[in-house]
Amino acid sequence: MTENAKTGKKHLVLVNPVNPIRKGFLMRNLSTFPPLALAILASLTPDHWDISIIDENIKPFEFKKADLVGITSFTPSAPRAYEIAGIYRKIGIPVIMGGIHASMLPDEALGYVDCVVTGEAESIWGQVISDFENNCLKNRYQGVLLPMGGYPIPRHDLLSPEYSFSAVQTSRGCPMQCHFCSVSAFNGCKYRQRPINEILDELEVIPQKLLFFFDDNIIGYGKESQERAIELFKGIVKRKIKKHWVSQASINFADNPEVLKWAAKAGCKMIFLGLESETEDQLKEAGKQLNLKRGVDQYKQVIRKIHRYGISINAGFIFGMDQDSAASIRKRFDYMLKSSIDAFQTTILTPLPGTELFTKLANEGRLLFSNFPEDWCRYDYSESVIMPKQMQPEELNSIMRENHIRLYNRKSVRKRFYRSLFNILRFEPAWWGYVTNYNYYCMAFEKEIREADPRYSHWLLSEEAATISKPGN
Ligand code: B12
Ligand code: SF4
């Protein structure tokens, strides 16, 4: 036992593992976000425990003595989570794993840890701790979906002060069930919201000026949830909480001018919208209901309305769907470059466990990498892990590369910044678009940057570097 001799407290170590093969978002401080789940778990742990967090986002794993270890993990970092679990289990310290990956694949996880907690922790963590204390820890616990109110404020004080952004979640669940996404399977189809006062109290204790609301859709679906979003934004203004924030939403973010007005007043600088594709057939393929219902011809209007209120747009597009050919991918990039969108997240279609997409592609025998768990670290949206329908995976990877150069070269990003300034007429949201494009550039060219290839290791790719790096040059 490592009970603290002075206090008699037991020690819980919570671990945030990172994908060892790709840094992805961790390439830059401004795209590195704290493990909110661990701050929540810490807040749910009884006071007679000492808690520390090992966060590989910030520095590589260093062993800390523990009585009990809790590990979180997304799918790409699962192999690393299992590796760290092994270090503790070898010396007889029990390891509990939770989070999206272990929830979707509890049997796999149980091969590497002592106990798996599936689902949301709020309903079950107290029981897990109490069973451990009474020497009757089971190997499985199932959290249930509860209303989001009445919990203690997450322990932001245990997260590294090196984070530029803090993270707060105001809602969970999504009724949309897009085929590639695991949110509805994990957090349920009902949109659940935290009480506004609890969110505002939490915002008041976090030190960072920059904030990421970790919601999938900050304004939810329907009139009622819009009203609640407006109340939240008004509350931020009323309590004089001065944050600059980003979040995610569906295109219904632009429906109500009051939502946009108050979001902007409350400090919203940029919103992520999952546009996914400019063609309705592909939206159908992805099961992207809301975008389909509105129609892709509405995108322009949506962008214009959001800009009008001083908020920039980071839009996500998916590549490599069954209907994608080399030509349609190039066309999508043409569309993106011509649009007034401020920043772009491009992802290669990736089946994640627990999604409809995963079941379909696995059944069709189209997973290229299925030596699990090792291969999970490839499932980070940055390479083709499936056999695309209309091309070879290498062709898809190379078209993406070619178009990333078009999208993220210095000239293109600068041009986009000036266009954002012109469209939004405010510096800050345009600057957020610029920084976000740079973050994605660093992710797209991670390998070259890490290997310090001089053609890539400076600020954004110049046109000249783009030419040098074209296949065949
Ligand atoms: C914000 C966010 C990001 C941010 C920040 C991530 C971060 N630092 O945490 C950014 C933009 C960087 C990001 C990146 C990625 N993300 Co992301 N992201 C999210 C989002 C919207 C919120 C995550 C979050 O923190 N939620 C709040 C916390 C409290 O929820 P939670 O982690 O589920 O934790 C609860 C339970 O799971 C449980 N729990 C969690 N850990 C543990 C541990 C123990 C011991 C126990 C008992 C319980 C427990 O208790 C918690 C409280 O109930 C989710 C969607 C969602 N709604 O969750 C997607 C999501 C997690 N992301 C996803 C993906 C795919 C990615 C990327 C791979 C791809 C991409 N390009 O977006 C990268 C990978 C990054 C990486 N580190 O590997 C997928 C993950 C699916 C999967 N199987 O892994 C999700 C679920 C969205 C989706 N489309 O399906 N992401
Ligand atoms: S992609 Fe967005 S809208 Fe679709 S199911 Fe996931 S969270 Fe909901």
Image (cartoon, rainbow, N blue to C red):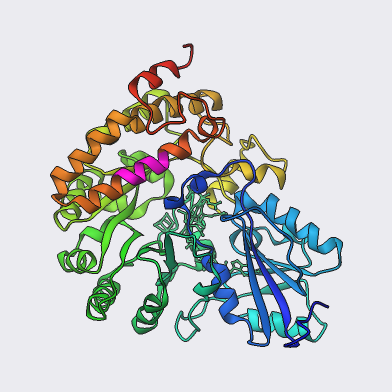
Visible in this render: residue 321? no
Q: Quadrant of ligand 2?
A: bottom left
Which residue occupies the foreground of this view, 400 or 2? Answer: 2
Q: How many marks?
A: 0
Note whether 98 is above or below 127 in the view shown: above
Considering every residue shown, the one lying at the far front of the view is: 6
- Residue 345 point in image, percent of width and height: 39, 43
Give percent across and percent down for residue 157. Answer: 51, 74
Range of magenta residues: 434-440
- Residue 235: name its quadrant: bottom left
Residue 201 sits above or below residue 92 on the image? below
Residue in the picture at 47% in, 60% down: 163
Seen at 68% across and 83% down, the residue is 49
Residue at 50 percent across and 76 percent down: it is 154
> Which residue is more in the foreground, 305 or 242?
242
Residue located at (49% from left, 65% from top)? 161
Assign the magenta stretch its main secondary structure.
Answer: helix
Residue farthest to the top, as pictured: 472
Q: Nearer the viewer, residue 353 or 377?
A: 377
Residue 241: say if magenta.
Answer: no
